[in-house]
Image (cartoon, rainbow, N blue to C red):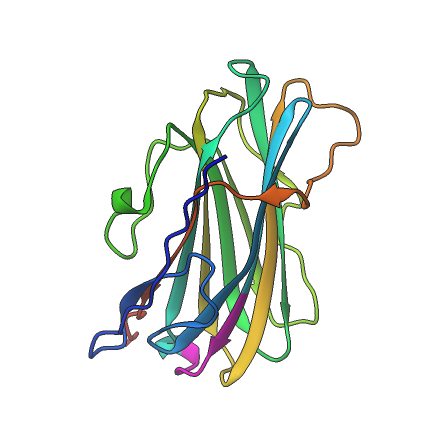
Amino acid sequence: MNASVSSGVEASAANGSGVGNLGGVSGVAVGNFTVTLVTDISTTGPGFTASSTTINISYVGPTGANSDTLIIEVLGDKFSNPTAPAPSFISSNASPSTAGLAASSVVMTSGVIAGNQTVAGLGAAGTTLGGQLGQTTGTGSMGSASSVLSPNPVTGSVFNIVNPFSFYQTYTFSGFTSNNDAGSLSAGSRVSSVPAPAGVVLALTGVPLLGVYGWLRRRKAAPTA
């Protein structure tokens, strides 16, 4: 069994923007954010493959209309599903929690991309990968002790799973109303065969993810007039 992890730290530009590679590194700083990829876990069982992520965030930048926007992309490759090429669907959910950090908008997307995608294939900051199958989107906010993105869970369209495939999630945080604080987000995505077994829930435990990459993007929001 082979595993590959990409890691590093990148300095921010003069305007505070930048790109940093997480890959399991503790406390990657980009601009006004410090982000830690706490866990990235995968598991495969009869008729399903699942991936879960926990991310810690701290922020020291401006608030309100001029607050920064944080975009995190988590890309895991070398996945396989025992039911391929059977019709499948993605279900996902996420729960932000905070010790004080508040953001009016949190958006999670999750999708599957055929083949083994790598960090080198990611586009410019502020863009996301195309060619996703069964994509899901959940929305919400960060600011209470615990909240859940809606809908919970969110279910994507049916598609034919292929092997190998890559899991791809994005997390976008914007509209920060507090700073000098920290928060976290726990999220999971699962590819299940159709029809799904009764009482399906996200499996958030398992073995370490093969070929996982955490990729942090941060883009300063344009000031409003």
At horizontal 42% and vertical 56% (from top left) the residue drawn is 23
On the image, which quarter does residue 18 sit in? Answer: bottom left
Considering every residue shown, the one lying at the far right of the view is 199
At horizontal 55% and vertical 14% (from top left) the residue drawn is 86
Does the segment drawn in magenta span residue 28?
Answer: no
Region of the chain picked out in magenta, as a range: 56-64
Relative depth, front residue between 223 and 97: 97
In the rendered image, residue 180, in percent from the top left (x then y), is placed at 50, 85
Considering every residue shown, the one lying at the far front of the view is 1
Considering every residue shown, the one lying at the far top of the view is 86
Relative depth, front residue between 7 and 69: 7
In the rendered image, residue 72, in percent from the top left (x then y), is placed at 42, 57
In the rendered image, residue 153, in percent from the top left (x then y), is placed at 66, 42
On the image, which quarter does residue 95 sit in? Answer: bottom right
Q: Is residue 213 above or below residue 27?
A: above
On the image, which quarter does residue 90 sit in? Answer: top right
At horizontal 41% and vertical 50% (from top left) the residue drawn is 5
Does the segment drawn in magenta span residue 59?
Answer: yes
Q: Quadrant of the C terminus?
A: bottom left
At horizontal 67% and vertical 45% (from top left) the residue drawn is 204
Relative depth, front residue between 176 and 12: 12
